[in-house]
Image (spheres, rainbow, N blue to C red):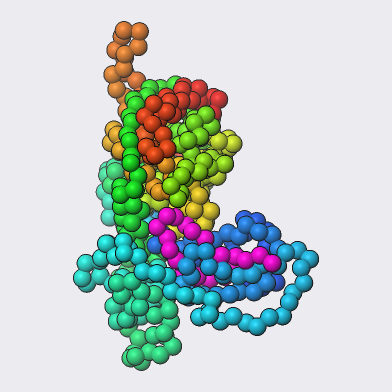
Amino acid sequence: MTRDELRILIDAELSNIAPEADPTALADTADLRGELDIDSIGFLDLITALHASTGVDIPDIDAARLTTRAMLLDYLAARAS
Amino acid sequence: MGIFRMPSLGADMEAGTLVEWLKQPGDALKSGDIIAVVETQKGAIEVEVFEAGVLDRFLVQPGATVPVGEAMAEIRGDGEALQPRPAVTASEAVRPPAPSPIASVARPPAGIVVASPAARRLAADQGLDLAAITGSGPDGAVLFTDVEAVLKHPPKPKPIEKPPVAKGQVVRPITGIDPLAMRAAIGTAMARAKREIPHYYLAHSVEIGIATDWLARANATRQPAERLLAAALFIKALALALRKLPEFNGFFRDGAFIPAERIHVGVAIALRGGGLIAPAIHDTDTLALDDIMARLRDLVSRVRAGRFRSSELSDPSITLTSLGERGVDLVMPVIYPPQVTIVGLGTPRLRPWVIDGQVTARQVIDASLAADHRVSDGHRGALLLASWAEFMQRPEAL
């Protein structure tokens, strides 16, 4: 998966969790949970969906540190086949 | 012969509008089947049937507003013969609900069209402008039937064109929740709580480091879909604490407390557009943590989509409101009538905590409780919070 494909995937999943927001308007370095008002279950849903669609293992201890789109992109791009 | 009636989906509900039947005459029914979708102030609710048999005939048609308790369909018991009988028209079976003096407190500001969710959906599907439709509901609200009437007899033959969608713009799905109606419903229920229920309040700081450490260990080896959140532990600990203190689990009706036979913890879930809803997790005390977590995730996803089941809304026997990880320290919650207790949990934080005379950093959460003084006293309320705190120290037993 390319970085651009991952970006589209991440934004689509963010749209599912925060249907009224426009994730594409968000800076790569913005705090996703704060900016989009995503609660613990919403964030877990995001990680679950990204794990399912990329096959990348995202241990809980890592997931807690992936607070921005840039961090998610770096993490997934380094591990996605 | 059984009768399927409009259920009460909360203390504030007087009537609901039938959106659609999901079963047809002749269909076999078992307890728990979803028979219809009913529109209320809380959005479109999937209504379950709690009787086995065969759906015989409908007494009301989609679009009809049906008072709580009124017959909607007849259900034939197994083996009972089908009997011919004259058809009942919707107007015979249904009478309009009595107007509520409180329902009008949340009058919308001028310039906003008040319309039921089903009316909004129908109007959007048909490309009609709601503002151009005369509403027959409370405060002139546009109802499903008003939109239908316009479709049958359009005053102007020219349909209003939908605004063009700019390239790249995402079209949002319409959910079944009308924010103004939801606000009015919350206002009605909370005004009644503040007017009728003599609340008392307690708060207790609880160290939950053992539970959060246990959770981190449990999640380390789990894939995301199987992971647990602290909320599942909070909910289970409350359900177990209630077993010993039944006077906090039940309803105050007609001047007396009626204990609930089962423990259905209602979990307050904030809606993204504002408002909240507290559907029940049934028989919470008997469920494993994994089951509670699965139910929680299912509830939250359906809250996002605006679809709930009638039993989840009608029968929580207590409510838990948890502020989550990005909230504030302490919540002073308001009881949802006719329940008699609501437990609140603030945001857990690392705080200075004294153990064996030494100050150390520990995960601490502020638990609070509001309960009905007509039913219980502060001493017993304190026992409930203390019992919850005790269960949180033994997460492996939850």
Q: Quadrant of residue B213?
A: top left
Residue drawn at (30%, 38%) of the image: B332
Q: Is residue A31 left or right of residue B233?
A: left
Residue drawn at (35%, 58%) of the image: B185
Q: Position of residue B288 (x, y in %)?
A: 58, 35
Q: Position of residue A35 (x, y in %)?
A: 28, 47
Of B324 and B335, the residue lying toward us: B335
Name the residue at the top extreme: B357
Does the stretch in magenta take in B16? yes
**Is residue B360 at all visible to an observer of this figure?**
yes
Of B179 and B300, the residue lying toward us: B179
Does the stretch in magenta take in A39? no
Residue stretch in magenta: B1-23
Residue drawn at (53%, 71%) of the image: B20
Residue drawn at (42%, 55%) of the image: B11
Name the residue at the left extreme: B110
| Residue B369 in the image: above or below residue B124 | above
Q: Position of residue A61 (x, y in %)?
A: 43, 30
Q: How many marks?
A: 0
| Residue B93 in the image: above or below residue B355 | below
Q: Position of residue B123 (x, y in %)?
A: 39, 77
